[in-house]
Amino acid sequence: MVAAVRRAAEELLEEVGYEGLILTEVATRAQVNKTTVYRRWPTKVDLVTDLFLSRTAEQDIGRDTGSLVGDLTALIHDIAGIVNNPAARAVLSVVIGGVLDEDARVARTAFWAERFRRGAVIADRAVARGELPAGTDARLLLEDACSPAYFRLLISGEALTDADIELFARRAAGRATGLQ
């Protein structure tokens, strides 16, 4: 049932976006009773947050490529892949700030906290390999590397090339080591 509702929500997000998402339509598409949906997800923000957090949990954030720049490059490539999915883009618009009610703020906080928690492994490995100094702030490193990609993909709409991704990763790694 949970998988069917998540799948239906994702399909509808791709088709109608966040604003057009209606929980009763999700229930119909998932072939479950609407009370089943409302019991678990009282609001569409709850459903969308659950959908995105479940997708985030499935992702292998922080793949080990053997180097800090490689790990950051892989992470940014993964972000680009996620953002290019229409359903993910609709959800990200909520997570980034498209909806400013209290539920959306809670959802946004939960989403980013989980992303930063899971991504911290990149900094931890780099410290263990001697690429970064002990005490490096993982969140600042991740923000530095990923923010330009999110900006290009979600704000300016500019293309994001492999060269751009590598530049963002190298620049963030350099700043974290104090070389830039």
Image (cartoon, rainbow, N blue to C red):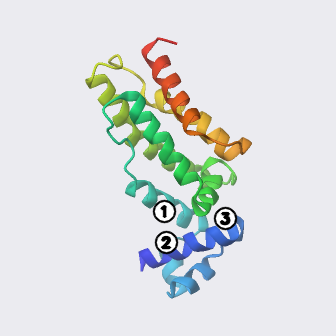
Is the residue marked by circle 3 packed among few (<14), some (14-19), or many (20+) residues within 10 Å?
Answer: many
Q: What's the CA distance linking mark 2 and mark 1? A: 8 Å
Foreground residue among 83 and 98: 83
Q: What's the CA distance linking mark 3 and mark 1? A: 14 Å
Q: What's the CA distance linking mark 2 and mark 3? A: 14 Å
* Rendered location of residue 71, percent (x, y): 39, 35
Residue type pointed to by label 2: Arg
Residue at far top of view: 179
Which residue appears at 58% of the width and 52% of the height?
83
Which residue appears at 58% of the width and 79% of the height?
26
Q: Secondary structure at mark 3?
A: helix
User: Which tag, 2 or 1, sits closer to the chain's start?
Assistant: 2
61 relative position to 26: left or right? left
Question: Measured along the vertical axis of the image, is residue 148 above or below residue 38?
Answer: above
The nearer-to-camera label among 2 and 1 is 2
User: Which tag, 3 or 1, sits closer to the chain's start?
Assistant: 3
Residue type pointed to by label 3: Tyr
| Residue 39 image label | none
- Tell me where residue 99 sits by quadrant: bottom right
Residue at far left of view: 128
The residue beneath circle 1 is 50
The residue beneath circle 3 is 18
Q: Secondary structure at mark 1?
A: helix
* Rendered location of residue 22, percent (x, y): 65, 75
The residue beneath circle 2 is 6
Which residue appears at 55% of the width and 38% of the height?
162
